[in-house]
Amino acid sequence: MEASKSLVSTEEIKRLLDVEKLKYCFECGICTASCSMAELLGKDYNPRNLLEKIFLNPDEVLASEEPWLCAWCYRCHKRCPQGIKLPEIFLYMRSTAIKNSFTQPLEKALEKIVDNIPLPIVTTLVCFHPERAGLTTEKILKTVEQVRTKRIKKKKTAIKSSGEKIAVIGSGPAGLTVASELARKGYKVTVFEAFSEPGGMLRKCIPEYRLPKQVLAKEIQFIKDLGVEIKTGVHVGKDVNFDDLRKEGYKSIFIGAGANKSQELKIEGVDLEGVVHSIEFLWNANCGERIVVGKNVVIIGGGNVAMDAAKTTVRWGADQVRVLYRRSKEEMPAIPWEVKEAEDEGVKIEFLVAPKKFLGKNGKVSAVECVRMQLGELDESGRRKPIPIEGSEFTFEVDMVILAIGEAPDLEFLPKEIELNEDGTIWVNPITMETSVQGVFAGGDAVTGPATVIEAIRAGKCAVESIENYLKSLARAI
Ligand SMILES: Cc1cc2nc3c(=O)[nH]c(=O)nc-3n(C[C@H](O)[C@H](O)[C@H](O)COP(=O)(O)OP(=O)(O)OC[C@H]3O[C@@H](n4cnc5c(N)ncnc54)[C@H](O)[C@@H]3O)c2cc1C
Ligand code: SF4
Ligand code: SF4
């Protein structure tokens, strides 16, 4: 096809594909091997092949659903030895498809999402971001609903209940995936959730403007309608323990407890009033509590959570919002789109800066003393280590500090037979998701550390298969 007749700008494709880099694409397949969507959809989605198709015949790709199947987790990009920005290339194809009125591929993609992914509406909004290609949230919600209604009518088959009971700890995307998939297969599933409402981080921390509570509630109702019982306000370890669950007849347990504990920053002044953790802050904002946001706010951290906290403070009326990140933009863990959105909303990001101490007046934070950093050798995370520049200290006034330096699982409630990794996550057999205790499975952030919704769903789906095999093996042994 001649370049001039193409619907896709050849120049833009060359720029995005970074053709020079692509020449050296090692065909290693790491992108596809690390992709949760490729695992969930099997032969229907292969990011490496899609990249090649875009290079060879971009116009043909416009009519395909494949670019719409990327869940924007950036895992492929982070692992690609060439640093190829696959999700951004796919976004360009989506935007061009919409501009040229190719709406059919999106509908086909949504059919695949509805068929293969529990929580399809939530994941469409939180992971697939069709709005970034120029579609409105209303249009997306309407289309997913229509597709789901059509698919349900098509699939109506009676499920024979096996009667076997399974307990799920945590109602985040990992737990809800396990619960809904097992319920569809006829098992009796009870989800135990410590928080007063189900949804995990989807409910607690992902801001309302990205995921409306009503949309989440509807999606969870859909799972309850499959026969799943969700017991909220029940903290496993305090209100009920593993032995109680076994005595109550639960044949298998899935742990989807997430990574809900904020990492501590050990510097002077962290206990001052006005210094808060991002999880706690977003949680209060999401619960509709009347939170008091400072006028002059500083966020410490460079991940997606830091970006959400920054954007939320802007929306709650802060005059000046600054993010301090101790490395450079290239090392930032937040995905570039989240960073751009925060900057567009007026958030100022200062790179190579770290807080040294927080200063206070009458017990309340009033200023932060910072130090400039430079990058040294690679550290164990594979990123260049930030080193303080002596004598570069400076201080500025603040009236609120939000710490967003990472989250970790809070697993003190687990019986000691369940082995943990050195970093405090749960050890599992990566193929079966079984923990060191037979019949107890785990997945999601509690196993990977903070990750993404789509990875939690993938883990849940993988665990379902193993739980079923385990239950069948129990039945055979009787
Ligand atoms: C602010 C923020 C924004 C994010 N934005 C995105 C995004 O845009 N896209 C994306 O893909 N990912 C995003 N994530 C990450 C995503 O939310 C998580 O990766 C995902 O929710 C992990 O799912 P999970 O089921 O493993 O755990 P969680 O969602 O954390 O759920 C775990 C649940 O287990 C419960 N629990 C814990 N211990 C117990 C116990 N002992 N007894 C009973 N219940 C217990 C908790 O209360 C919680 O409800 C974001 C995370 C945060 C914090
Ligand atoms: S991971 Fe990168 S280098 Fe390897 S096949 Fe994928 S795009 Fe090519
Ligand atoms: S961004 Fe995530 S979902 Fe998209 S291709 Fe890469 S690994 Fe797969």
Image (tube, rainbow, N blue to C red):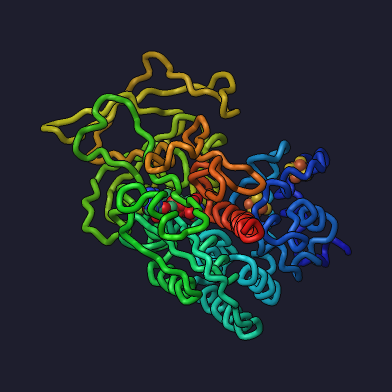
Residue 419: give x, y in percent of width and height.
51, 36
Give the residue furthest to the front: 478
At 77% from the left and 57% from the top, the residue drawn is: 50
State the image coordinates of residue 427 (x, y, percent, origin top left). 55, 39
Indicate whether 96 appears above or below 329: below
- Looking at the image, how many numbered discs can be counted on the residues? 0
Res. 308 in view: no
Q: Quadrant of residue 103?
A: bottom right
Looking at this view, is 4 or 188 the one in front? 188
Image quadrant of ligand 2 equals top right
Q: Quadrant of residue 265?
A: top left
Residue 314 appears left or right of 43: left
Which quarter shows the N terminus?
Answer: bottom right
Residue 60 seen in render: yes
Between residue 431 and residue 78, name the one nearer to us. Answer: 431
Q: Residue at x 57, y 82 (%)?
A: 149
User: How far across and how far down the image is residue 413, in percent?
Assistant: 38, 43
Residue at the (49%, 32%) spot, across then down: 423
Farthest residue in the bottom direction?
153
Viewport quadrant of the C terminus: bottom right
* Left or right of residue 22, residue 430 in this image: left
Q: Is residue 266 above or below residue 21?
A: above
Residue furthest to the left in view is: 362
